[in-house]
Amino acid sequence: MKEIRLIALDLDGTLFDNNSRISEKNIQTIQQAVAKDIHVVISTGRPYGGLPFEQIADSGIRFAITANGSAIYEISSGKCLYEEAMDEELIFPILDFLLARDIHMDAFINGKGYSPISCIEAGEKLNVPAALKHYITKTRTRVENLPLFIHENHLKVQKMTLNFFPDGKGGFTDREKVRKFLESNPQITCVSGGYNNLEFTRADVNKGAALVKLAQLLEISPEATMAVGDTENDLAILKAAGIGVAMGNAIPSVKAEADYVTSPNTEDGVANAIAHFCL
């Protein structure tokens, strides 16, 4: 069995249960791994500001791969160690297309989430678990004009997250049209992070590339890493890691890519995976 020195954990659907809580068993097992000099890190589609700071305060987790790999942060200081973000030239034509659609959108910038004021009403229609809906609708800074806000403040966008609404016919309004539009652009990478959303970053950005970068910063071989996830935005990191672990609740493509399938997020799947490979 490989010696693991770095474990990367997705949040939603993985380390979190369905109420966005981390079980005591998961925390205790992470602490045991850290005590063995194993780096345990977060690997999430969320921005730095969306991390569960209170829940992981005593866990020993020091670093976070955020926004699908667009940025790596030291959690305690908020220092950004690495960033690959989208500039105005890339993001503005995409925003022009998206702002004409019936969707809820978030822009992750400098580790924070921003959303157009026009999306406030749209957020109330989101068909996601209550804890996730609260996170999406209550933790964003609302801006009147998102492109103007980006331009005037000379900002770059780490990631965009798009949430769609049921169309009454078993699908989601504008989702396929938006996906085709995004996938036709070779300068970006488009994936789903769960609940039929779409997320996009620069084309050379994903959680797997960020895992390799963080391992390099920590002087750890990629072969000595393990990653745990459940959705499409975790595929790259499961491929990049020495050991890729799918949650029991993961989508079929993630399970097919994984070296091991652990129990679901509601049954301490993270703790069970860490114990199996590291303890």
Image (cartoon, grey):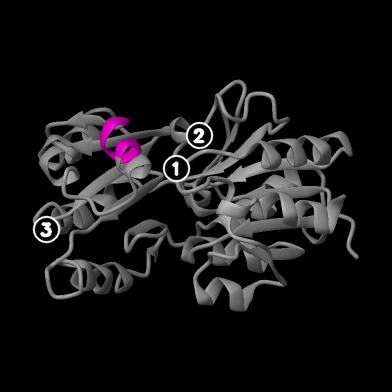
Q: Give me the disc on residue 257.
A: none
Which residue is rendered at x = 20% and y = 49% of the image?
Answer: 104
Determine crowd level at label 3: few under 14, some 14-19, many 20+ residues with C-alpha closer than 10 A. some
Q: What secondary structure is marked by label 3?
A: loop
Q: Quadrant of residue 176?
A: bottom left
Asked if disc 2 and disc 1 are in contact, CB closer than 8 Å, the reply is: no
* Residue 65 seen in this snapshot: yes
Between residue 80 and residue 104, name the one nearer to us.
104
Type of amino acid at the residue the image marks with label 1: Asn
Q: Start and end of the magenta stretch?
A: 134-139
Between residue 151 and residue 221, name the one nearer to us.
221
Q: Give the residue pinned by disc 1.
A: 19
x, y percentage for residue 22? 58, 39
Q: In 3D space, how far apart are the residues under numbered discs 3 and 1 (Cα atoms)?
A: 29 Å
Looking at the image, residue 252 sits to the left or right of residue 108; the answer is: right
Type of amino acid at the residue the image marks with label 2: Leu
